[in-house]
Amino acid sequence: MPIDIDIAHVARLARLDLTDADLEAYKAQLGVILEHAARVQSLEVEPNVEAAHPLGLANAFRDDELRPSLDRDEVLGQAPEAVDGHFVVPPAMGAE
Amino acid sequence: MIASSLSEAGRLLRSGATSAEALLDDALDTASRTEAQLHAFLTIDADGAREVARQADADLADGIDRGPLHGIPVALKDNMCTRGVETTAASQILAGYVPPYDATVVTRLRGGGAVIVGKTNLDEFAMGSSTENSAYGTTYNPWDLSRVPGGSSGGSAASVAAGSSLLALGSDTGGSIRQPASLCGVVGMKPTYGTVSRYGLIAFASSLDQIGPFTRTVEDSTLALTAIWGYDPLDSTSYQGDYPSPGARLDRGVDGLRIGVVTELSGEGFEPAVEAATTDMVARLEKEGVEVMEVSLPTFDIALSAYYLIAPAEASSNLARFDGIRYGLRVEGATTEELMARTRAEGFGPEVIRRVLLGTYSLSAGYYDAFYGQAQRVRAAIQEDFARAYQQVDVLVSPTSPTVAFDAGARTSDPLAMYLSDICNIPANLAGHPAISVPIGLDEAGLPIGFQVMAPPLGEETMYQVAAEVERLAGFEISPRALEGAA
């Protein structure tokens, strides 16, 4: 049976402003895909074993040394709106 | 075409029979004759490429030889950042984005004297199996223009098949190099995870993504891989140990090797012509002295399910960066959150939205352990299944794709049917192992069939050894019929 999900909640978490019609369509498709994906639950597995890097590597970090970074103006030049070395956004808190 | 392969082009260049500029002209001529039908490219950088080609010719004249890629026309999937050249990942949300830096693979290509012709089409953010999810229009298959080239690296596969490049790079998260290579009749290879830097590759699912080459021959594939792989401090998952020599055993034959035929990758859903060609190739390998055995890897049956939890989960996290603030599209809103939600709904196409929703759900409170957590445990079980199989055999083989190229539009309304296109490819991604697709023949409709060879981590030498023998036995000719009129 297709899995029933609270699609409006998921869309809000994903920051996607979708129409009601779109939400319904995605809800139906995701239900079918998740029903197939739920087959992973059929396998009996050790609860604490998770997949690892195939070559056994742990996350690596470079040495903490100063070095040049990307040119600020060039990076800000890609922004939809930038002023005086800053990205510009509307208020983070609304009138709610 | 001046040269039928990268290695032949290299020989002609060094003998003085051709020049990098002539090879570029040849590639650009092919593109101008075929692009109206194929739409393999999103951007062609003819001026930039010409400058590099002239420099490559001048360097050779001065005795400076940068190696096998020197002067070779190369195409790049448009999810690899190129400084100064628009990079969109085939998404509206990145329309007009011009990266301020090169991906590490691009730096390596440039250092090797390669001539970058342009950026190829893909499914948006590499999510898809047909290149129909591009925001900039579909790519078509050079063997039959009513069919898909596969995906997500469909533009790269179509370009190499058509001859508008001699090498193209793609990325393979769940078959996105091997499946289009199979459908377009070229060689496509996914290296061991961690061996080719992902720095500057626009991330889809970081624990699965791996860059690899499309080429016209197996030897070319070894030359390309040798040029692009190696440790990179800019990628935190990069492998620092010893690397194999991909081309070391191409001429050695396969006598004495043990090959496992994967039981789970046959039967229902596999086209008879694909199964027959695969079985025939295995029989021919056996005649060459290979020991063949059937090997069962039971977890392969749920690999696709695990993949469609893990990959979207990682994608939902990686794609959070596309929010209308630092680059790309912006749709205004009264608050920052409204701006982000409107920008993302407008800028992402339906498949990307579907996967972001799917990933957000499987990572959300209350569902994490049953879905994402369980999928990660299945992933470990798949790695164990592979390890057991490789105690008995040197490589595993299967069809690359259960079907030949399908009709454009045939699977676009059924996401699950589209996902099943990659059923043979996904286990190697989940395990992080190398795998290659080699074209072995045509079905009765004249469409290419690919043969997949999988190997253990860093098993590229043996994988290529078998692939070279498969190529020799198949004697496959890359001559896409649909382009004959355009030639």
Image (cartoon, coloured by chain):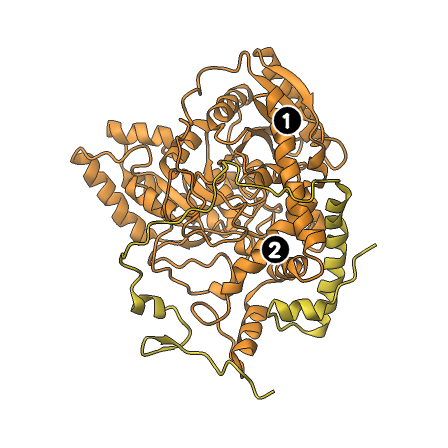
Closer to the camera, A85 or B126? Answer: A85
Residue B408, visible in the rendered structure: no
Name above or below for residue A25 compared with residue B68.
below
Q: Quadrant of residue B301?
A: top right
Foreground residue among B424 and B284? B424
Q: Is A60 situated left or right of B375 in this image?
A: left
Viewer-side residue, A52 vs B26: A52
Horizontal side of B252 relative to B354 (left or right) equals left
Does residue B201 appear in the picture of this structure?
yes
Q: Secondary structure at mark 1?
A: helix
Q: Which residue is mark 1?
A: B388
Question: Where residue B197 sits in the image (x, y, percent)?
Answer: 41, 44
Where does residue B102 sit, x and y in percent of width and height?
A: 35, 52
Label 1, label 2: how far apart the Cα atoms are = 28 Å
Q: Which quadrant does the N terminus of chain B fall into?
A: top left
The chain whose colour is orange is: B
For marks 1 and 2 on the same chain, the one whose residue lies earlier in the sequence: 2
Where disc 2 sits, the SS reads helix
Q: The residue marked by circle 2 belongs to what chain?
A: B
Tell me what residue is drawn at x 68 percent, y 62 percent.
Answer: B365
* CB-based contact (under 8 Å), mark 1 and mark 2: no
* Total count of labels: 2
Vertical relation: A33 (above or below) B379:
below
Badge 1 amino acid? Arg
Residue at the extreme left: B62
Instruction: Tell me, by letter, which chain the rendering colours yellow.
Output: A
Q: Decide: is B360 above or below B447.
A: below
Q: Which mark is residue B313?
A: 2
The percent coordinates of residue A56 (x first, y second) are 50, 37
For label 1, the crowd category at 10 Å Cα-Cα, with few meaning under 14, some 14 to 19 and many 20 or more, is some
